[in-house]
């Protein structure tokens, strides 16, 4: 299972300048574009949601296909996983989607628990708090389990940088897919312009199981 540690090291320095600007009073900074509403829930074999503007990009792995749009770009991909990143004025948002073969009867909650244990590295994150379950969690229109976390990551010139982590997992047959987002954007912010949840919904609904 791919670790988030190299992902954290990659984007954490990008948070320094934006956070300094925020502390100086910047208040109307753009984050991710708000996508069109996605048709959740969906029964049957549902296509990924479309967008009115922008070219679609498709990446295929052994267990799933993902369609994504700008400003997302692929940072890494292999036979079972895709890592995406999108820049905002607060720093990069990084999403890791990974799949695995599992035993029949494995639950989404079990996969979520294992993913959290493997990826919430105390050497990379401090002060981690469990912010509770993500209601309606799903991946690729398959209902699952989700949990959100908040904590801090530290760099030499920027200690205690806030970070928000959202994890979701679903199981279909003997395949599991997990979605992990690491972001400087607070999903509970009262400012809708910096809440990434709609963009996360668009991505998880753009996963097509193989």
Image: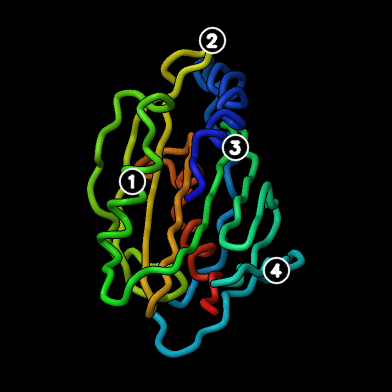
Which residue sits furthest bottom?
Answer: 44
Q: Nearer the viewer, mark 4 or mark 3?
A: 4
Q: Secondary structure at mark 2?
A: loop
Residue drawn at 37 percent across, 68 percent down: 170
Q: CA distance from mark 4 to mark 2?
A: 37 Å
Q: CA distance from mark 2 to mark 3?
A: 18 Å
Q: Earlier in the sequence, mark 2 or mark 3?
A: 3
Which residue sits furthest top?
Answer: 157
Q: CA distance from mark 4 to mark 3?
A: 21 Å
Q: Earlier in the sequence, mark 1 or mark 3?
A: 3
Question: Which sits in the foreground, 81 or 126?
Answer: 81
Q: Secondary structure at mark 1?
A: helix
Q: Which residue is mark 4?
A: 58
Q: Earlier in the sequence, mark 4 or mark 2?
A: 4
Identify the image quadrant of residue 67. Answer: bottom right
User: Contact (CB < 8 A) between labels 1 and 4?
Assistant: no
Identify the image quadrant of residue 89. Answer: top right
For mark 3, does the 10 Å Cα neighbourhood hold few (<14), some (14 to 19), or many (20 or more) residues? many
Q: Which residue is mark 1?
A: 116
Q: Which residue is mark 3?
A: 92
23 in relation to 152, above or below: above
Q: Secondary structure at mark 3?
A: strand
User: Contact (CB < 8 A) between labels 4 and 3?
Assistant: no
Q: Position of residue 45 (x, y in %)?
A: 49, 88
Q: CA distance from mark 1 to mark 2?
A: 26 Å
For mark 4, does the 10 Å Cα neighbourhood hold few (<14), some (14 to 19), or many (20 or more) residues? few
197 in relation to 39, above or below: above
């Amino acid at each position: 299972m791919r670790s988030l540690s190299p992902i954290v090291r990659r984007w954490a320095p990008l948070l320094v300048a934006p956070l300094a600007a925020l502390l100086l009073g910047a208040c109307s900074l753009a984050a991710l574009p708000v996508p069109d509403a996605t048709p959740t829930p969906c029964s049957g074999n549902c296509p990924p949601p479309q967008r009115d503007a922008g070219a679609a990009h498709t990446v295929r792995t052994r267990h799933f296909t993902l369609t994504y749009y700008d400003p997302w770009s692929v940072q890494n991909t292999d036979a079972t996983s895709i890592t995406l990143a999108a820049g905002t004025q607060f720093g990069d948002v990084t999403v890791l989607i990974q799949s695995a073969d599992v035993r029949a009867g494995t639950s989404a909650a079990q996969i979520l628990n294992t993913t959290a244990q493997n990826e919430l590295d105390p050497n990379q994150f401090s002060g981690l708090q469990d912010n509770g379950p993500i209601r309606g969690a799903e991946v690729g229109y398959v209902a699952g389990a989700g949990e959100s976390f908040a904590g801090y990551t530290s760099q030499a010139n920027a200690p205690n940088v806030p970070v928000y982590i959202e994890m979701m997992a679903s199981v279909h047959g003997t395949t599991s897919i997990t979605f992990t987002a690491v972001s400087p954007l607070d999903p509970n912010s009262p400012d809708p312009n910096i809440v990434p949840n709609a963009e996360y919904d668009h991505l998880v609904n753009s996963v097509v199981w193989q």
